[in-house]
Amino acid sequence: MSANAAAHTDAAARRDPVLCARGVCRAYPIKLGFARRKVLRGVDLDLERGAVLGLVGPNGSGKSTLLRLLAGVDTPSSGNLTVLGGSPADSAVRERTGFLPEDSPFPGELSARAALELLGTLGGMKRAEVRARGDELLERVGLAEHARVALRRYSRGMARRFGLAQAWLQSPELILLDEPGAGLDGEGFEALDDLLAEAHGRGATVVLASHLASDVHERCGELALLLGGRVAARGTPAELLSQPGRWRLEVEDLEPTDLGELRVWVADHGGRVRAQAQGGRTLLELYRASAADE
Amino acid sequence: MVEAGETLFSTGVPVNRSLFLLALRRGLRPGLIVAALTLAGALLLTGGAGSGLEVGGEDGARIERGLARQAMWTALCLLVAPAIAIAAAREVGRWRAGEAAWLAARAAPPRVIVGSTWLGLTAGAGLAALALILSAEAAAGGAAAGVPLRAAGVLRTEMLEAPVTPGTLSWSCPAPAQLAPASRARLALAVWARGGPAAQIALAVERAGGGGRTTLERRLARAAIVDIELPRGAGDFLFTLEHRGEGAAVVLEQGALTLLVPVASERLASVELALRLLLALASWTAVGLGFGAWMSAPGAALVLAGAQALVWLAAGPAGPWFPASDLGAALAWTGAGIVPPTLTPAAWLGTAGWVAAGLVIARLGLVRGWGAA
């Protein structure tokens, strides 16, 4: 293949949507099957290769259900859903998809290393390949020392880190993360950001669901707001979360009296200081400083 | 979608080793087996597994060991077997409760997941059966003197003419093509209190085409089992049962004439029971997985238990095709100090059929949707 043709194919691949949802609905039977609870009510969504999409919405808006459909764990009641050019139920598609489920339901009786071996081989990886990649990922998420510990002994944050490791195991092209920040400590968030940077670097697409703006604001290039089982709004974090005229400022090296002058200046210019709090170190900075002291 | 070379004994049937080992671990239920073995030990220490029977001679010793073996197997079967079958039904419940999120998201197709899980659960059942053999044989103690026997088939099943008060009853039975030395016929006789408390009988058997003749005389006071050595020779067996003098009536019970052949060891009784249990567990785990893919785990376990009860109550001639249909009879033979009959081809074929059906139902359930499973 010529360089031009290769470049053209690559460009075309980048333009092809990684996922395409049209009128996707999902309803579950309730009351002994005499009624149905509609969770998704016609989701329309496209996502291009390499994008990082934040799926936001309140509890019960259908974020987890949509991710399960995208991961091939569940099937839509109606509508069309295409992921990586095929059905999410296709083995070839699932091989290229990584999924971090909401509650870390991994087999608690297995150690992290054994669980990764199970998950990797079920995904079609060679056993030796799983071991090498698994050890590397456990190191990256800070679980190398706990690789032989049974997952049931992990704390919530450690289980979440393990979940991240398994989602990245097959270097997937599409990564689906359901509330990845739940239970993560500072180092866990650092590991998440490191993995997201690696995924972005190789052109992988990420869908990150969260009900916390702080999880998605700086990690996602685009947000989709899910409300009542439908995509109610879509745009960049700035477009969706910013409010004209409202700013957040973090200042250093000022005395409290200087702050008073600043408030006066703001008032003189027609503004109003909505909140003021003592700034400080992040928890991660505190941990590191304490560790250095010891 | 499994690593190359990961097949079942190089048969080409794909199996995921890690999932197999996980299912084995879950199916084995080590805590339950330890509890069962503890109970076995307690029974041994308190003498609960022994019969307390006072029967003289080699047969008496063998029956006593048989009763100990039977008691242990009954207790262990009741404890361990249902737990393993329920573990299978629960496995799909675990998938539904959340594990589908990592199982279904992987590339492995449902047939690999269902097959590997069933194999693991059945292997766990196999290890449990092995533990049961060891504990039951420990309870039975050392082998008894004399020739151990196996129930090798029924010579005659229909009710014979009765009563014999007094008089002689003769009948013939076809002989097996090959008759091992020291083979016996076992007759179940019942004594009716009519004209006296006991009956004096004389039993003789000879070959229609010539050969030896064996006889025995016995005074019977109630229902009794009588063993008589079968003569070697040619042609059918010719039996003569004579009721001598006044006394109670004697009848032959239905299904009363069984062929007993010598075997290497009476411990084969435990092997036969373990094989029956293993085939039943293989079927139950497959069908449990199948039902579990369509209904809740308690519901699946309930349906499974109901179906098994129906098999025991009303299977009739189709019985051999159903799992564990003759477990009760095998336990009864064991209690009598006799090794139960070898499994029939119908039992093996029936198991294969139930396993295949269960796995297909499970696979269909998963294909329908993991979320709905």
Image: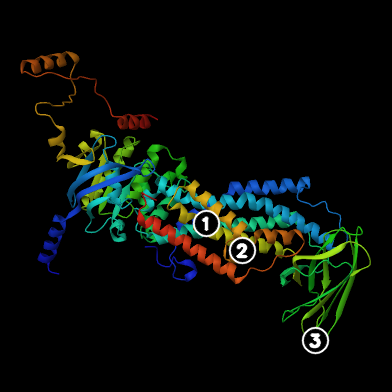
CB under 8 Å between discs 3 and 1: no
Can you give x and y, in whole percent of width and height, for residue B34 in the image? Answer: 63, 48
Based on the displayed image, in which of its 4 quarters is residue B280 positioned? bottom right
Query: Label 1 marks which chain's residue?
Result: B
Residue at numbered disc 2:
B316
Distance from Cα at disc 3 to Cα at disc 2: 36 Å
Query: Label 3 marks which chain's residue?
Result: B
Query: Label 2 marks which chain's residue?
Result: B
Q: Secondary structure at mark 3?
A: loop
Which mark sits nearer the N-terminus, 2 or 1?
A: 1
Q: Is residue A29 visible?
A: yes
Q: Is residue B16 visible?
A: no
Residue at numbered disc 1:
B285
Q: Amino acid at mark 3?
A: Gly
Q: Secondary structure at mark 1?
A: helix
Which image quarter is the C terminus of chain A in?
top left
Please tell me how crowded label 1 is: few (under 14), some (14-19), or many (20+) other residues with Cα within 10 Å.
many
For the residues beneath circles 3 and 1, the answer to whether they share a chain is yes
Instruction: Spot the residue most to the right.
Output: B245
Q: Nearer the viewer, residue B373 or B159?
A: B159
Please tell me how crowded label 2 is: few (under 14), some (14-19), or many (20+) other residues with Cα within 10 Å.
few
Left or right of B252 in this view: B344: left
Q: Is residue A101 above or below residue A88?
A: above
Q: Amino acid at mark 2?
A: Gly
Residue at numbered disc 3:
B209
Camera-near label (3 vs 1) is: 3
**Residue drawn at the location 33% of the way across and 51% of the way down:** A73
Please tell me how crowded label 3 is: few (under 14), some (14-19), or many (20+) other residues with Cα within 10 Å.
few
Distance from Cα at disc 3 to Cα at disc 1: 51 Å
Q: Amino acid at mark 1?
A: Thr
